[in-house]
Image: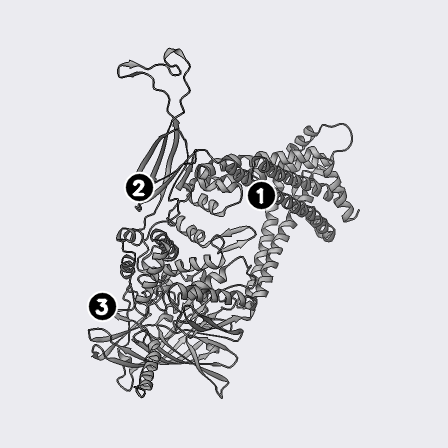
Amino acid sequence: MNVIQCAVKGIRESTVRPKMIVLLWSFNLLVAGLCYFVFLRAFGGAVGTSALVKEMVHKADMNVVVEFLTSASGGAVTELFVIVIGLSVLYALVSVFLYGGILQILIQKGGRWRFAETFFAGGGRFYGRFFRLEIYSLGLWLTAGLIFILINALINFNFRDSTNEQTTFVFTIIKILFAFFLVFLIKMIMDYARILIAGRDSRDVFRSLLEAVRFVLKKPAKTLALYYLLGLAGWASFLLYKVLDSAVPQTSTVTIAIGFLLAQVFIASRGWLKIAYQAAQGRVIGLI
Amino acid sequence: MRRSIPIFAAIFLFMASALFAALSRPIASYDIKARLVPAEKKILGSEILTWLNDTDLPVSELRFHLYLNAFKNSRTTFMRESGGSSRGFKADKNNWGFITVKNIRIQDGDDLTPSMAFIQPDDGNADDRTVMKIDLPTPLPPGKKIAVAIEFTSKLPKVFARSGFAGDFYMVGQWFPKIGVFQNGAWNCHQYHASSEFFADYGTYHVEITAPEKFVVGATGKRNGETKNADGTRTYVHDQENVHDFAWTACPDFIEFREKYALAEPSVKTEMILLVHRSHVKQKDRYAQALRNGLEFYSRSYGPYPYETITLVDPAPGAMGAGGMEYPTLFTAGTTTWMPKGVRFPEMVTIHEFGHGYWYGMVGSNEFEEAWLDEGINTYSEIKAMAKYYGEDRSMIDIGGLKIGSVAYNRMSVIGSGRFDPIVKKSWEYISGGSYSLNVYAKAGLMLLTLEKWLGEEVMSRLMRTYFERWKFRHPTSKDFIHTAEEVSGKDLGWFFSQVLYSPDKLDYAVSGLKAEEIAAGEGLFDGRATEPPGKEEGGAPAKPAPKVYRNEITVARYGEWIFPQEILVVFDDGEKVRETWDGKDRWTRFVYQKTAKVVSAEVDPDHKMVLDANYANNSRVLELKRPAVVKAALGFTAWVQGFLSLISF
C-alpha cells in the first residue's frame, strides 16, 4: 500500500468513528474547561466591572489585556499560569490513556463489541506499557537534544562574526525547522512503537521502541511522507477554522457562542486527525 | 546716508553670520586628527583642546573622560555594574577596548604627562581608569584659555555599549580624551557607568579623519574637505560649532543617501545624510520618512533645527549594540533585514534619536545626574511625534489586527514595575539598569504627558518652547525645568513635581464602590406614630404608586501615595451626567445621591489626564458586570488552552 492509499485509509477509518472523535473532544474540553472558570473569576474580578471592557465585546483591545496582566493581583495571573501547566501535565497523562483506547478500537477485529467498553478497556490495558514507553522515550529526546545542540553550536561558530543578516536569518529558520523535524520524528517513532505494542499485544516495550526506530530508519521516505501528508490535513483544518472564525463577528451572546462552537469543531478535528494518524501508520507497519 | 548703507549692511551681514556661531559660548573646542587602523581596530589620534575657564575661580587641574577605558577589563566600574552586558549584548572578552594617552602637554609649553593620574570620584574603584586628572603648572585664571595637546591611541572593542567594531563596521563614539565640565567651583567629571550617558561643554570641533579608501565615512558636522592620500587612504575634514561631542562611523558597506530638507515655517534648511547598510537598503525610505517627520515635528514644536546636516547611521547586522544612540548632528538608528512595516521600531528609534539633537544636543543637561531631562523629555516628544505621524493607538505596533500605541507601550513597563526609585537620581544609583530605564524614559515621559493633560496642550506647548529657547546651548537642571513650568503656567506646581520627580510611589485612584439601592418605605415609629401601610390614601382609595427612589453611592479611593485632585463622572440611567471634584487627599470619599434614577457608571479621571495612573481598569466601574465581554474573553482563553493541550499531545 503506498503512502497516499495509507493516508486515505487512515482518514476514512477516522471519519467513520464519530463516537471516538466525540470522546477525544470531550476529554479535551473536560480538562481545559477548568480554565474557563478560573479565567472568568480572575478576569471578571480584575476588570469585569470596569467600563474599559465595554468595547471588548466588539474588538480585542490589547490595552485591556495589559491592564489585566498588570492590575490583576500577581496571584491571579500566576494561578492561571500554574493551572495551565498543571492541566498540561494532566492532559499528557490522559493522552497516554487515550492512545490505548484508540488503538484498541482500531485493532479490534469483527464480532460484537461495545465501543465504550472496548475503548476504556484498551486505555487501561495499555496504560502501563505506554507510560513506560514515554519514560524510555526520554532517551530519544536526549539524543535529539544533543544533536540539536551540536548543530546549533556548529552554525553559531561559523556565523559568530557574520554581518550578513540574510544568511544568519536563513540559518536561524533552518535551525527552527530542524528542531521541529526532530520533535516530529520522535513523535512518529512513538506512534509506531505504540502500534507495535498494541498490535502484537507485546509487553516488551523497550524492544518495541527499538523496532519502531529501526522501522522508521528502514523506510524513512514512506514514514515521513505519510506523517507530513497527514500534517497537511491538520493545517487545512486549522486554516478553515481561522477563515470561518474571522467570518463570525463575535459581538453578541449568540455569535460568541457560535465562535466557541467553531473552536470546538476545530478541537474535534484534532481528535479526528489523531485517529487518522494511528490508523494510517498502522497500515504502513501492517498491524491495523 | 547713502554711503552709510553699505557699512550698515556689512555690519548686519557680519552680525547675521556670527549669529549661529554665537548660539553657544565655546568652552571646550577640539582640533583632532584621527587615523583608522582597521587591522588593529585602533584609532591613532592627536588633539588640541582649547579650554576656557568660564568661571569666577582659578583652576589648578584638568579632568578628562577616557570613556573607552570602561571596556578595558572586567573590573572597571562599567563592567562591574553591568556584569559585562549592556542593552542585551555581551562584551566580547577577546576584544577589549581602551584608550591610551601617550603624552599631554600645554601647546608649545610644559609637558604635563608626568602629572597624569587616574581618579575615581564616584566609587573609588582603583581598577577604573575612565577619569584622568592632570595638574597645571600654574592655575588658570578666570576668563583665560588654555590649549592642551594630547596624543592618544584608541582601541575599539567589539561593538558594545554604543561603540566599537563589527566586521568592517566601525562606530567611533566616546573615543577621544574629553574634558569634563567645571561648574560651581568643582569638576563635574564622572566615571563611565553602566547606566549613564554623558555631559560636556559646548565648543567648536575641527576633525580630520583618515581611513582606507574603501570605507564610506560619516561624522558629526559638515564635511569641508576630502583628500586622497598616496597610501590608499582618504582624509575627511569635518567642522561643527555649537556642539559638545563628536562621533564618526566608517563601513565599506554603507550606501550613502543625501537629501536636502527644507521647511518654510519655521525656516529650516539642512541636509539629511543617510548611511544605510547594504543589508537594510530596502528600509531606506522608512528611515528617510521618519527623519523628515522628526525634523518637522521638533522644529515646529520646539524650535528650528539649526545645523546644516543631520546624519543617520544604520548599524551593520551584528552591531546592534551601537544602535539607538545620539551624538550631535549624527545618530545611530537600527533595524533588521525583515522588519515588518507594522513594527515601527526603526521609525521610533529614528525619531527618538533625532530628538536627542534637541534634548541632549542643544539643551545640554547632565545625563549622569538627571537623565530624565534628556531621556524623559525626549520620550515625551517621541510619543507625541509617533502619535501624530503613525496614529495614537497604533504608533508602535500595527500588525495583523494587533495595535499598540506608544502610551500603552510605555505604560506596560511603568505599571508592571517595582517602585524602588524616583525619576531624579544619579544614573548609577538606581537599584538596577531596568529601574534606571523605566524611570528616566517611560515614567518621565508619561509624567510629562500627565502634566500636559493637566495644564492643557497649549500651555504645555508654550512651556516646552520656552524651556528650549531659554536653555538651549546651556546646562539646565530639574529645578530650571520646574521654574520654567511654573512661570509659563502661572501655577504653583511644586506639589506635582515633588511627587512625580522625587518620590518612587505611585498614582492610583479608583472607583472602589458603586451601588444603587431602592429606598423602601419607612417602617416603624416616626414622631411617635406608627407608619401607615403604603398604598392607601384617605378614604381607602388606592394610591398612585410613588416613583421608586434610589440611594446611589459612589465610593472613590486613593490606593497610591501620590495625591492628585480628581474629577469624577457619574452617569445615571435617565441619561443625567454629574461631574464631581475631589481634592484627592483622603484615602477615600463618597458621593451619595437620592434620586429616582439609578447610577449606571462612575469614572475617576474621565478625561484621562492621569497617564501615570497605575491601573486604568479600576478608574471606572459599572453597576452591572459586562458579562458578554468577560465570557467572550474566558471562552477565548479556554479555546486557546484546548488548542494548546491538543498540540502538546498530538
Foreground pick, B171 / B341: B341
Task: Please state which amino acid type lies under the numbered disc 2.
Answer: Trp
Decide which of tag 1 and tag 3 comes sooner along the chain.
Answer: 3
For mark 3, name the chain: B
From the viewer's perspective, is residue B534 above or below residue B610?
Answer: above
Point out residue B121 in the picture as x, y percentages from the top left corner. Answer: 27, 66
Q: Are marks 1 and 3 in contact (CB under 8 Å)?
A: no
Q: Is residue B417 left or right of residue B584?
A: right
- The image's colouring method is one colour
Q: Quadrant of residue A10?
A: top right
Q: Which residue is mark 3?
A: B184
Q: Nearer the viewer, mark 1 or mark 3?
A: 3
- The residue at which mark 1 appears reads as B644
Give the left or right position of residue A39, taking residue B594 as reference: right
Amino acid type, label 3: Asn
Q: Which residue is mark 2?
A: B582
Q: In terms of depth relative to the viewer, which is nearer, B30 or B20?
A: B20
> Disc 1 sits on a residue from what chain?
B
Q: Are marks 2 and 1 on the same chain?
A: yes
Q: Amino acid at mark 1?
A: Phe
Q: Which mark is residue B143?
A: none
On the image, the x and y values in percent for residue B14 come to 33, 82
Taking depth in this image into account, of A193 and B510 the one nearest to the observer is: B510
